[in-house]
Image: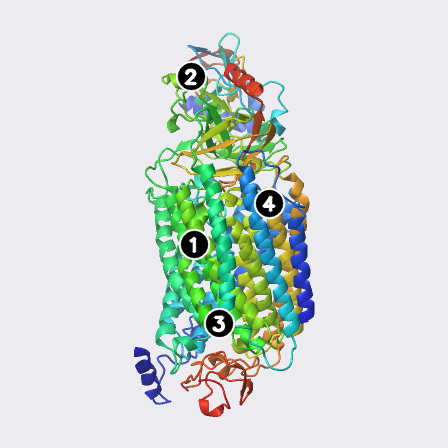
Amino acid sequence: MPMDSVSASITELPPAAPHHHVAPEGFIRKYVFSLDHKVIGKQYLGLGLIAVCTGMFLSWVMRYHLAFPDKPVPLIGLIAPTFAAGGVITPEFYLQLMTMHGTIMVFFVLTTAPFAGFGNFVLPIQVGAEDMAFPRFNMMSFWVTFVAFVVLVAAFFVPDGPPLSGWTAYAPLSAVGKSAGPGQGLGQSLWVVSIGLFCIGQLLGSLNFIATTLDLRAKGMTLARLPYSTWAWFITSMIGLIAFSVLLPACVLLLLDRVAGTSFFIPAGLVVSDALQPHSGGSPLLWQHLFWFFGHPEVYIAIVPGFGIVSTILPAVCRKPHLGPRVLIACQLAIAGLSYMVWGHHMFLSGMSPMSATLFSVPTLVITIPAAIITLLWLGTIYGSKLRLTTAALFCLGFVSVFVTGGLSGFFLSQPSIDTYLHGTYFVVGHFHFVMGVAAMFGIFAGTYFWFPKMFGRMMNETLGKWHFALTFLGVYATFMPMHWLGLEGNVRRYSSFPSDYMHGSIALHRFITFAALFLGAAQLIFLANLLWSRLRGPVAPDNPWEATSLEWSTTSPPPFDNFGGAHPVVYRGPDEYGVSGARGDYIMQTDPPAETASGPV
Amino acid sequence: MRMKLVASVAVCALTTMALAPNAHRNAGGTVAGKVTFTGTPPKMKPIDMAKEPSCAKEHATPVMNESVVTGAGSTLGDVVVYISAGAPSGAAPASPAVFDQKGCQYLPHVLAMQAGQKLEVKNDDQTSHNIHPLSKVNPEWNKSQPPGAPPIEVAYDKPEFIPVKCNVHPWMHGYFAVLNTSHSAVTGSDGSFSLAGLPPGKYTVTAWQERFGTQSQEVTITGNETAKLDFVLKATEY
Amino acid sequence: MGKLFAAAVVVIALVSAGVFVAHVWWLPPDISALGLRIDRQLDETMIFTGVLFVAAQIALAVFVWQSSGREGAIRIFPGGPMPLVGVATVIVGLEVLTLIFVGTRVWAKIFLAPVEANAVHIDVQAGQFAFYFRYPGPDGKFGVPHPDLIDEGNSNFFGLDPKNDTSARDDIVSASLVVPVDRPVLLTMHSKDVGHSLYIPQLRLQQDFVPGLVIPVHFTATGITRTEIVCTQLCGLGHYNMRAYFEVLSKDAYEKWLVDQAGQ
């Protein structure tokens, strides 16, 4: 294996050899345009935090309006006087909020935080590298993503506001321009540009993750010894590399349709607001295929890092090796592979041939098998363990619970015949919020409580953390479980209100969901307070507060600029040496040489 | 030409002094007459409002399309008659032009206003409308107005005949006639119009109908007389 | 703490499952010939996922209850990972196979089965933000739609050309979908502008309109009813208000309705 020679050549360097980049002094190079993967990781997490607060705020306005369609929403009239004068939510403003909520959450929270954020901070340390393989690409990746976010949010400040075509931006609604509705002019163009930029940022990030994992591992860090989180980020970057490289050209084509008069997604003979469109020959289904070819793997880009985080934290808090490590990795690889064969299940109702629908339905159902195995492995790991219920542990357990719940509702939607009834309803909203939104968020929370001491050198407050978990867990079920019931009733999603008699009866359930969502949102204030308090006043963290085994816990909290203070870690074992009698107690770190241990396989 | 300029300056001065913007309408000549048509106009169809029960129940009998409104004696309604040339220039009236949505119809179907005049759009229905004026010269806009929402207030800067539609209720079609002058009238179904308050001078009067196009005639006003002017538009099937 | 978590998980699981079992919120009664098959498929999936849901949540609760704060040696799961892999593959796999097999048959019945010859053919056009339904009239032939002739202000929603196209003259255009009971209905669905979808929960029918395509669906309504059709594909600001009424009439009432419409 060529890896050995690379590792050998690294260890042959004299300890004082200059690194490929040196610690910068100035504020700008240190904290703004930093090449340090740890700073970039924190920048991504900071962006994710800003984005999630924005996205959550938008959802409160939507929820309030759904529960009380006739009442003006408090305060919003002051914040957005042009769109919601007097707090009255117009149907287009509701859709604009919804589009921005979805786009911000899926792209700028669920992709940036668990993948780019934690991955950037943790992955190079976990493989024993000083930095990412391409630090400048890494910096570019963040700043391109940041610009993408600014461009997206700028849509709130243009005359017609943000687009209203949803996070999926189906053509031709997204392609024909201004006449299709407010926000479909400049707002939609900003959206397309933003998502295109975002793709570039994530492609750079994915390349970096792959190169770093393959080329910069410390001596002894074989692929089999990689911690599960690194495996997950590695797999995620392979998914992302393919997914984003399809979405990027799709965005370019959509932009051309909008500004250059092409007709990739617009067929002939469309009459929008009395105007015959000067287009012909395009296919709206092409956009759907390109989008969902990205869109479904995107679900796994959001959730697979969560798998890795849970699988890394569970053994540490259970004080027990992970059950079936190779099966775990194999299942994640299977999921990654299958994730490219299922996109059509988003399009069962698009006039797809029943033959194709069946072909897409089969892998969609089959993908539940590796997902079920992973869940059982987690349960098997918890079984007979010595569970330490830290906040991070609680969020991992919560992850398992919501992942099961969200995953099972997928069984309904993966069958074309049942999807025929449920496709456009709140059932789908409940499903993806559980499996993609909440599960990924629980992964982010678990990762935050777990790695915060390493990132900032201070411990987070566990009491606040446990309250945060308890209220969040209850709030999540109260908010998203009833959406399945709404869906069964036939309650349609993406409606700003329910005029006349249609679905008027379910307003009580909508009100309950709104109260639960506001409760859930309020619970997140505890988290924000904890972050702030712990960052400033938290007790100083030891190097290895959780008695964990992977490389990041063998260096200081926070790690020095080059991660290991000029040393080059050597790895002797996998990350799963828990429940063994070692020199330190019931665990052996990956860097502990065999001589120091009383027992345990090498 | 010079006469006209002097006259208009005089009128403006008079107006300013009187502090009553429309005072000049009381004095001066009047152009009045009727708009009729020849030929066979298209038969208007009833509108199926089943989609919007709250509007459907406001109408005892089906509402007809309004792109051609006729009266007894081949008179033509909803025709904008206005001074297209020679009109004394003046500031836009201070009172807004009001466009109401009631029973999923536009009241009036054609609304004339002067460029710069405030336009007020009201919703008197129990349902949301979106007002989508399909302007080409002026900036296009498209806004929803939920029931009970405050009136939308805008103004158009440039003269243009702007089709207005409601995408939520596709049958709702109307027109904003944004003109350079406040000297305009929209005929009722009896086809009659009257443009008053014209100082002496030579004018071009134009009649515009959304289907049948425009027709212009010249008229000279010398004093306080009423000049009679009739328009006969040629009806076309589509 | 562990016990509290375990109890919370069990309570949440049982309450959630209970609401499903008690059908507190459930599908409206089915009025289509094939809806019962979909309902049966849904019930089967519900039972299968319900059992897995409760079982997994309870297993999580029990394991957490047992192992939180536990002392002594750790216990490896009996038999290691492979039995779990086997169980998951067999149980989920078998169910998956069943669902695919049954589901495909249901789907095929709805979409692959040919339309009966006596079907009522109705042409449906979706546009921002209304549905319009077209019946061929006495001649049994639809006029050819011309997008450039669409004139909504004059109720020419389909862009018909009655002047030059004789088959267009007697076409009946309605804002409501009116069908006779117990007779197959064929809808040919097309969109005037952007993507839309036609959803009739009572018929268990939902189908997208894709601009540029004409998509056929067929159904047979088995109960006399009046309900709403709603759009479920995001189409713009009026999406929430894009609806129409769906009326199933007796044979006689339907014939009378057709005559009344033609008279207008």
What whole-number distance in Å separates the C-alpha atoms at marks 4 and 3? 38 Å
Q: Amino acid at mark 2?
A: Asp
- Residue A66 appears at what percent x and percent y? 62, 46
Residues under labels 4 and 1: Cα distance? 25 Å
Q: Above or below — where is B171 with respect to C207?
A: above
Q: Residues within 10 Å of mark 4 (few under 14, many from 20)?
A: many
Query: For mark 4, what is the residue?
Result: A488
Do the numbered discs 3 and 2 sit on residues whose CB atoms are within 8 Å?
A: no
The CA distance from mark 1 to mark 3 is 24 Å
Q: Give the SS element for disc 3.
A: loop
Q: Chain of mark 2?
A: C
User: Of tags 2 and 1, which is closer to the observer?
Assistant: 1
Q: CA distance from mark 4 to mark 2?
A: 42 Å
Cα–Cα span, label 3 and label 2: 70 Å
Instruction: For residue B140, say whether it is visible.
Output: no
**Disc 2 designates what residue?**
C139
- Cα–Cα span, label 2 and label 1: 48 Å
Q: Is residue C152 visible?
A: yes
Quick check: marks 1 and 3 in contact, CB under 8 Å? Answer: no
Q: Which numbered dot is residue A363?
A: 1
Quadrant where the N terminus of chain A is found in the figure: bottom left
Q: Earlier in the sequence, mark 4 or mark 3?
A: 3
